[in-house]
Amino acid sequence: MLTASAAINAKPRDRAYKLADSHGLFLLVTPSGSKLWRLKYRRPGAKTENLLSLGGFPLVSLREARDRRDEARKLLDDGIDPGIKRQAEKMARADRAANTFGAVADEFLIKLAGEATYGTVKRARSMYRTYLSPYIGDTPITEVTAPMLLAGLRKPEAAGKIETAHRARSLSSQVFRYGIATGRAERDAAADLIGALATPKARHFASITDPEEIGPLLRALYRYQGTPVVEAALKLAPLVFVRPGELRTAKWSGIDLDAAEWRYTVTKTGTPHIVPLSTQAVEILTELHLLTGRGEYVFPSVRGKGRPMSENTINAALRYMGFTSDTMTGHGFRAMARTVLDEVLGFRPDYIEHQLAHAVRDPNGRAYNRTKHLPERRKMMQGWADYLDSLRNGSNVIPIGRKRA
């Protein structure tokens, strides 16, 4: 029988050799100096011998190797091949790993990367790593319960990040639905948490809506000295009043300068939308096309043409010009347009809401399609651009509450 000291003192040779113990157990010493425990055995009913790895010495001691040998021999006595049993357990672990919430989430995020913007995917990955992975990442997706998921969502909620908690719940719901679609989940556990989280407070984006203050803002935008891309984005933002994310990710493929139209899919609702472009907007885009027209994005990032402008660029420029976050934001151009188009210029509210890409419905409850009132909206967008020019030039300032005759 082999002794511990013999195993310790065994030296490598030119060829691998064995040091036998008992009942099929031996230590294989390789030319590289590795010492590996092996068990020689016959499968039930088989004539040929098989080998079972039991680990390496000295990490697995002589006593531990004998214990593992005895466990394997007990299986053989019960008619179970220890090698096949080990393979089955390994496959089960691999299958379990492939069906964890984390594995399904990784696949979903890869899929998302091919459909969404870089910033959207980056935020989703960060949210998953912070609020979902530590709590349910290693759990099979079929075993994730609502209380387990809620434990992770309580972290941002307790920190006052209520909207983040809701976004994380929404992300987990998307992962569950992807798991259902790929046959690895049966239900969406995140759906059970609707109403379980605190309700986020309504958020109002700071905006300048007084015509007497809009003029100085516009003059500041036109005086801003930065890159041509940022200068163009600042000038275009009030003219089109789309969501900041839609402006910065605008693609040339969706802009028809000859037809004076910008067509894209609204990120919030997933519906097609048309922005009629005023002559002022077309002029800005035509000039910018000479600079960025060969690329995908109208407003490419300074870090590379394959990425859109940073989501903080517009707000950062406003702060540089002296407009605080309590005064004006990139999103505030929407509130500006909504207020002035209605209260000063007197355009119909449904024209305005439709141009804002809000969910406007007709008297029968049907959602208006993207071309509804398009001729009227063209006139409204041109009238809006002309009015902004008059404010920037210091004329035709009509106070809020007094509509143009």
Image (spheres, rainbow, N blue to C red):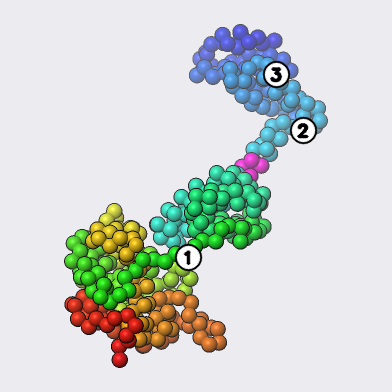
Within 10 Å of disc 2 (Cα), the crowding (few <14, some 14-19, many 20+) is: some
The amino acid on which the numbered mark 2 sits, given as a three-letter code, is Ile
The amino acid on which the numbered mark 3 sits, given as a three-letter code, is Arg
Q: Position of residue 94 (x, y in %)?
A: 61, 42
Q: Residue at x 56, y 50 (%)?
A: 154
Q: Position of residue 278 (x, y in %)?
A: 28, 80
Q: Is residue 253 visible?
A: no
Mark 1 and mark 2: Cα distance apart in space: 64 Å
On screen, residue 159 above or below 42: below
The amino acid on which the numbered mark 1 sits, given as a three-letter code, is Ala
Mark 2 and mark 3: Cα distance apart in space: 19 Å
Decide which of 157, 171 is in the foreground and name it.
157
On screen, residue 121 above or below 85: below
Occupied quadrant, residue 245: bottom left
Q: Is residue 71 visible?
A: yes
Which residue lies under the disc numbered 3? 66
Is 93 inside the magenta-drawn segment? yes
On screen, residue 325 above or below 255: above
Mark 3 secondary-structure assignment: helix
Q: Residue furthest bottom?
A: 405
The answer to which of marks 3 and 1 sits earlier in the sequence is 3
Which residue lies under the disc numbered 2? 80
The answer to which of marks 1 and 2 sits earlier in the sequence is 2
Q: Residue furthest right?
A: 78
Is 71 inside the magenta-drawn segment? no
Q: Residue at x 40, y 86 (%)?
A: 348
Mark 3 and mark 1: Cα distance apart in space: 67 Å
Q: Which residues fall within the magenta stretch? A: 91-96
Q: Residue at x 20, y 64 (%)?
A: 224
Within 10 Å of disc 1 (Cα), the crowding (few <14, some 14-19, many 20+) is: few
Which residue lies under the disc numbered 1? 202
Q: Position of residue 62 (x, y in %)?
A: 65, 15
